[in-house]
Image (cartoon, rainbow, N blue to C red):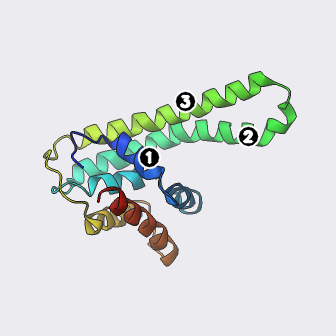
Amino acid sequence: MSKQSTSFWNFSNQLYDRDDVSTACLHLQNEFQFDVNLLLFCCWAAHFDETLSPDSWDRILEFSRQWRKEVVQPLRDVRSWMKGESHHYIENTEFSVLRERIKMDELAAEKFQQEYMEKSVAEVPKQSSEFSAARAQDYFNKLARANSQEISEEISTQLQILIDAVEKITK
């Protein structure tokens, strides 16, 4: 994988579609409040020889926290509420169309976040290397610390699913 040929968005879609990856990501999101885009970013960034600078990492974390709080989470909350209420509106196709539009807006917001994150590491040399599970784990540890989260055995098991999937798609 090279940074020039595989954008973060394309990489994350390819990874997320792998067996068990979406389940692991959503489990980490719902149970431990990890941002799925940040988890995927840790895997993507682990392909580059240069480690992210503390400034880049802080910028990405701060933007992601704010973006999730002000944009992604409100869209997700509305979409989830509508899903739970859909039985009241079974006959109303406009309700379903609106829910689908909100889902697409949520996806567009996540894509914007990923594009911002990728641009935030523009100073990283364009040299890619083999995926480094150790580098990914280091990024996961930094993410956990930023979330004031200990990496428990349960979290570690879910993160290992991501690492295993990346290793499969990069061989």
Amino acid on which the number 3 mark rests in the picture: Asp
In 3D space, how far apart are the residues under numbered discs 3 and 2 (Cα atoms)?
15 Å
Which residue shows up at 80% across the image and 38% down it? 85
Location of residue 46 in the rendering, given as x and y in whole percent from the top left corner: 27, 58
91 with respect to 11 (left or right): right
Front residue of 82 and 19:
19
Location of residue 16 in the rendering, given as x and y in whole percent from the top left corner: 46, 51
The disc label shown at residue 73, or none = none
The crowd level at tag 3 (other Cα within 10 Å; few <14, some 14-19, many 20+) is: some
The disc label shown at residue 83, or none = 2
Q: Is residue 150 visible?
A: no
First-in-chain label (1 vs 2): 1
Amino acid on which the number 2 mark rests in the picture: Lys
Q: Tag 3, which secondary structure?
A: helix
* Location of mark 3 (residue): 105
Front residue of 29 and 43:
43
136 with respect to 13 (left or right): left
The image quarter in which residue 171 lies? bottom left
In 3D space, how far apart are the residues under numbered discs 1 and 2 (Cα atoms)?
25 Å
Amino acid on which the number 1 mark rests in the picture: Arg
* Location of mark 1 (residue): 65
